[in-house]
Amino acid sequence: MTAADPDLQSFAPRRRFRVGARWLPYLLSLPALLVCIGILIPFGTAVFYSLQRYRLSQPWARQMNWGENYLNFMSDPAFWNTLQVSLTYAGLTVSLELLLGLGIAMLLRESNRLNNAISVMLLLPLMTAPALAALMWKLMTNPNFGVLSYGARLIGLEEFKWASDPSTAMLTVVIVDIWVYTPFIMILLLAGLRSLPKQPFEAAALDGVPPLFVFWRITLPMLTPYILTATLFRLLESIQQFDIIYAMTQGGPGDTLTVFQVEAYLNFFQSTNVGRSAALLMILWAITYFLSSIFIKNWLRLRERARGDA
Amino acid sequence: MYEKEKGLIDAFIRGDLSRRGLLRGLAATGVSASAASALVNMAQSRALAADFDWKKHSGTGVKLLLNKHPYADAMIANIETFKAMTGIDVSYDVFPEDVYFDKVTAALASGSTEYDAFMTGAYMTWTYGPAGWTVDLNEYIMDPAKTAPGYNWDDVLPGLRASTAWNGVPGSALGTEDAKQWCIPWGYELNSLTYNRRMFDQAGVTPPENMEGLMEAAAKLGRDIPNAYGVGVRGSRSWATIHPGFLSAYANFGQKDLNVGADGKLSAAMNTAESKAFHAQWVKMIQDSGPRDWSTYTWYQVGTDLGAGASAMIYDADILGYFMNGGDNAEAGNLGFAAFTPNPAASAPTPNVWIWSLAMSTFSTKKDAAWYFMQWASGVEHGTFGATKMDFVNPVRKSVWSNEDFRNRLEASYPGYVAQHDASAPGATIYFTAQPLFFDLTTEWAATLQQMVAGQAPVDEGLDQLAASVDRQLKEAGLG
């Protein structure tokens, strides 16, 4: 056999192709693998740090303390306050945004020029960076020259202090969150509403079924997968809220708004307490994972039911 | 240059002739004031370069990390002088203060070699120094091969030199024999009263002389002056709320943040009876006469309210008042300055100080060149240039403070500024206990203050809880 053998030469490219075909699946999944590694390395590092007593200002004291950071949380009132504030914030914003988003989507359900134009305009807050939106609201609620403070005084609320008073700080940041993110839920639900099959609604109209009954028994069940998706997205983002709260109050007044991300940020960048900051973020990750698992499980169950598998 | 002019300038450089005498002499020879200044700068650079090899690192480049600040502006305005004198190229990144320290922490924690020197505050070095991120500058200052003979380190105000040096032992005093010089003071601010003279005249109020007087004056001004509140102080949930007026007044009543035991262990000291009495006064002052959204107030809001005429006075950094008395602020030219001794039993003010300083990164690969820059930027010549030509206040050198031009300029445009500085400076130092949990504890202190002002926590109870939490954190960190 020689290299010049024409019969053998004709096989060479095919052999190369066979080798390529063998590696092709691995090559195709390589980008996903790289992304996975890119996620897992920092994640693993954070887990490692969370098991250490690690303060940048005391490098000599760095050591593994295993679960001590987590155990310390159990007896730390600041941690329980953070948990409570984060869940309250997420619960309030998501439920109110869902109600408002669904209401607006129902109003804009009919596809016509006016509704389409309004739905596009309603998306404008979503295009504003949340930190900028927070600064804008901070100016609007300024007691000296803010337009909203002026409005509050007109209706007799002379001393309404918005984000600077513990009793109204949560309300204020929730309002800003609603202003920014309700359009997101609205547009998702609007897309869902417009994609629902028309037949059940036509049949209900022919039978003279009351609108409220149609909403509860037809619209809402059919829209549930969309609602779950929108809720999942918003819940994940809301429980990890940072920019609106930090830009408006830095977590104050007092510890009124010290949500997980703000607390973790201050622990790292201000206190340089890497161990505690990482442990806080790990707990936030666990909560997020738990919540998203519930939502995804329900979403899959609903999808199977819609297909008639269950 | 003509011989006569040259002789005059050389006499000035030697210290045989005052600046005023020099300018008069040059004017007699037909040199205009601006040309005279340029000639003096050139001659000073020449003199500076005469006895030291400033060109040793010519061709090197150093990179700086800077906060957006008038000190940085003054340095940038004069940087060509340094480049021409040394042949060292200087580049820099400038960040606004909101994100500046995050950037510094990220750069240093990652061991980045990008920046050779950076601006910092003394409190930050209590983290950076022990972490091994900054260089002990004693080894440069004390080395005649690296530091020009005219640098005159002893010319830097002693309180500031001490405040930027720490031996790294939690609770240990600043500026001890074994302390490491983590940074070089560059410019500083002390805390006193800046007040609106127009409003004071209108309300028939004189600058208060103690805490009671401050509370009364602020309340009266709030009542008598339409659309203005009595006194501006910081209130955001940050360590920055504690360090200016609040700690200055707190220290004046002889109170401390932490106790240092004989065994070196630290414990909270903010729940003594005297501390509680002071806190109660401070809280009442804010409730009665502070801004309505006090809990969001940083130095920026405190300053701009004063400049805009929304507040009658501030108890904050003197340089904040300085900057509000100029530019296009509505109240420019109306502001006055007064030293402040809150405790009637105290003999003098005790202003806590904030010192903008220059530090060198441990990870710098051009440390010697970076030190050349640092000694020039913190030297007499640049300090004088900044103080007389730019807004480089407060200078850290005694020689600059005794500069007639500088003092006259302040006297003319900032009534009472020099007097308040001279009265405050002897007691001006850092009144915090140096320890690595500084930011944790002061942020929590600010949050507690917010709760007290909002009526969420009574002063007594709030301070006891704060002290318990501080003790717990100190124990957890192995310091208590």
Image (tube, coloured by chain):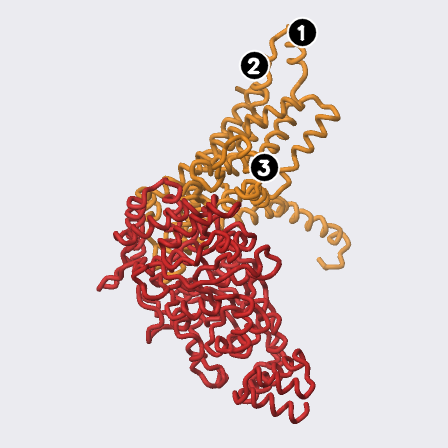
Chain colours: A orange, B red
The structure residue drawn at horizontal position 32% and vertical position 68%, both measured from the top left corner, is B173
Residue under pointer 1: A206
Query: Is residue B360 among what the camera can see?
Result: no
Q: Position of residue A154 (x, y in %)?
A: 55, 32
Residue under pointer 3: A180
Q: Which mark is residue A217?
A: 2
Q: Which is closer to the viewer, label 3 or label 2?
A: 3
Left or right, A8 with reference to B133:
right
Q: Are marks 3 and 2 in contact (CB under 8 Å)?
A: no
The structure residue drawn at horizontal position 35% and vertical position 45%, both measured from the top left corner, is A70
Rounded to the nearest whole Å, what is the CA distance between mark 1 and mark 2? 16 Å
Q: Is residue B256 above or below residue B358?
A: above
| Sequence-earlier tag: 1 or 3 | 3
3 and 2 marks on the same chain: yes
Left or right, A12 with reference to A91:
right
| Sequence-earlier tag: 3 or 2 | 3
Q: Position of residue A254 (x, y in %)?
A: 40, 44
